[in-house]
Image (cartoon, rainbow, N blue to C red):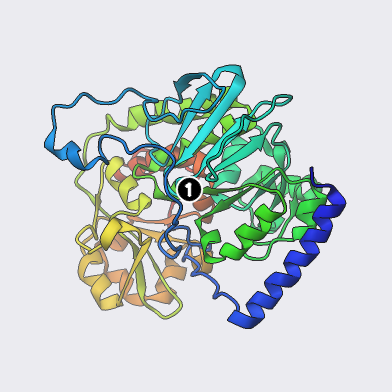
């Protein structure tokens, strides 16, 4: 087993090697930052190249289109066969499609990532891992109570299941968190800043005995960082909840993290609340009212949410219609925003029922009509502004993955005129 001293020495060697690599090849360009101030987690990242470990599902099999009457596979049909372990069941997932969790006798669990094809075998505390020849399988030895959390969207999920005690390092400073529990934990010194995704503090990772680094897809911009972290004996897990087709699929990732740290009951309780709210939301009638979520960038152009973006999908779920649904969202619909001239924006926005200003990132603070009109006086001619149907979206929206159902509920309140307190969506005054 590698000692801490050996890890520290390896850490110094790797750091020097990375510096030499960057000097020779040129530093990697910084990834695009979204207008909401968060790191973009989808389209900019190169596609992973690791081959999947599980067999393709019926929907992925080339012959499936020719046999529509084939019986659907039972949950867990693709569960990997692990030497020495007896399969029990698969995690029940309602919305999430980017992962599966399989349970085996003795408390063993297997997480299958459908994004990069990697597998993660969770070994209960005090037990040993079976011999697995597959190099694409990582071993996670419980307890996993020293985590380096880089995936910003996951912090609220750990907070919601009262599990911030397993987060030792993160990639944000305290003043960048809208997750109150995380900010307070950092102020108390219980969670430390471990460096951003592209420049982690390797020595601190070693000194903190980090069990696993939970990254988002931005880490694929700097594959050398993945190599270095794993050479230190720290498994890397890539969280890609932003790829979930249904917005609530992002919230359901709490069940994966609950399985990872052994807190399934707490995770299920949190998700059950969101699911009950979603069941109510699904009964809402369509309003046919058009909504545009937008901002004006530093160049004076308008940015609207692309049709396949999760906020645009939430408009439809809440009973509204995306005013810019006609936009070409590109192959796969990965783009978060679509940029256009103000003239192009006005052509649609002038007669849109509701305008929602995305007051995040460099637009943070644009939360009154006066401030918005300072950026574009012509917005005063839009029907939504004249009728008082102009709202602003709080910047904390993008960190509160645990509250997605709440935001959808607030969108419906806006469309229906229902009164009540809101957290993320506010009427402009």
Foreground: 45 or 58?
A: 58
Foreground: 426 or 74?
A: 74
Residue 286: tell me if it is visible: yes
Question: Quarter of the image holding residue 329?
Answer: bottom left
Foreground: 289 or 180?
A: 180
Foreground: 27 or 424?
A: 27
Residue located 68% across and 46% down the image:
182
Please determine whether, in this image, residue 53 is positioned above or below residue 272.
Answer: below
Q: Residue furthest right?
A: 5
Please determine whether, in this image, residue 81 is positioned above or below residue 158.
Answer: above
For label 1, the SS is: loop
In the image, taking residue 338 as reference, residue 120 lies left or right, namely: right
Please determine whether, in this image, residue 220 is positioned above or below residue 147.
Answer: below
Percent x, y for residue 180? Answer: 66, 45
Percent x, y for residue 400? Answer: 53, 45
Percent x, y for residue 375? Answer: 42, 75
Disc 1 packing (10 Å; few <14; some 14–19; many ≥20): many
Residue located 84% across and 47% down the image:
3
In the image, taking residue 150 as reference, residue 340 lies left or right, namely: left
Q: Quadrant of the N terminus?
A: top right
Residue located 47% across and 65% down the image:
34
Q: Quadrant of the C terminus?
A: bottom left
Name the residue beneath numbered marker 1: 424
């Amino acid at each position: 087993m590698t000692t801490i001293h050996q890890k520290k020495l390896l850490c110094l060697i790797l750091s020097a090697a990375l510096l030499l690599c960057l000097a020779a090849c040129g530093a990697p360009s910084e990834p695009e930052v979204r207008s909401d101030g968060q790191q973009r987690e989808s389209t900019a990242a190169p596609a992973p190249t690791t081959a999947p470990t599980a067999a393709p599902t019926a929907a992925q099999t080339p012959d499936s289109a020719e046999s529509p009457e084939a019986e659907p596979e039972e949950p867990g049909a693709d569960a990997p066969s692990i030497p020495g372990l007896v399969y029990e069941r698969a995690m029940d997932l309602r919305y999430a499609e980017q992962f599966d969790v399989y349970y085996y006798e003795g408390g063993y669990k297997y997480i299958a990532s459908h994004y990069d094809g990697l597998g993660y075998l969770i070994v209960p505390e005090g037990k040993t891992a079976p011999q697995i020849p597959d190099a694409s399988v990582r071993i996670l030895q419980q307890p996993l109570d020293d985590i380096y959390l880089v995936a910003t969207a996951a912090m609220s999920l750990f907070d919601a299941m009262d599990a911030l005690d397993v987060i030792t390092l993160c990639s944000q400073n305290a003043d960048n968190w809208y997750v109150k529990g995380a900010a307070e934990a950092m102020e108390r010194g219980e969670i430390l800043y471990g460096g951003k995704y592209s420049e982690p503090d390797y020595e601190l990772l070693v000194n903190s005995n980090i069990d696993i680094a939970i990254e988002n897809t931005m880490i694929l911009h700097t594959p050398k960082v993945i190599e270095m972290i794993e050479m230190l004996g720290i498994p890397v897990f890539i969280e890609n909840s932003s790829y979930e087709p249904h917005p609530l699929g992002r919230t359901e990732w709490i069940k994966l993290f609950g399985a990872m740290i052994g807190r399934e009951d707490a995770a299920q309780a949190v998700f059950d609340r969101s699911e009950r709210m979603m069941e109510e939301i699904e009964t809402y009638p369509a309003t046919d009212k058009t909504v545009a979520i937008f901002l004006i960038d530093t160049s004076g152009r308008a940015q609207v949410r692309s049709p396949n973006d999760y906020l645009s999908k939430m408009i439809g779920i809440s009973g509204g219609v995306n005013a810019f649904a006609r936009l070409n969202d590109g192959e796969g619909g990965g783009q978060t925003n679509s940029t256009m001239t103000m003239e192009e924006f006005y052509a649609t926005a002038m007669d849109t029922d509701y305008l929602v200003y995305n007051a995040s990132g460099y637009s943070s603070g644009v939360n009154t009509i006066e401030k918005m009109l300072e950026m574009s006086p012509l917005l005063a001619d839009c029907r939504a502004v004249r009728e008082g149907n102009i709202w602003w979206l709080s910047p904390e929206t993008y960190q509160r993955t645990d509250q997605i159902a709440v935001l959808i509920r607030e969108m419906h309140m806006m469309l229906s005129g229902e009164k009540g307190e809101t957290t993320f969506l506010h009427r402009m005054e």
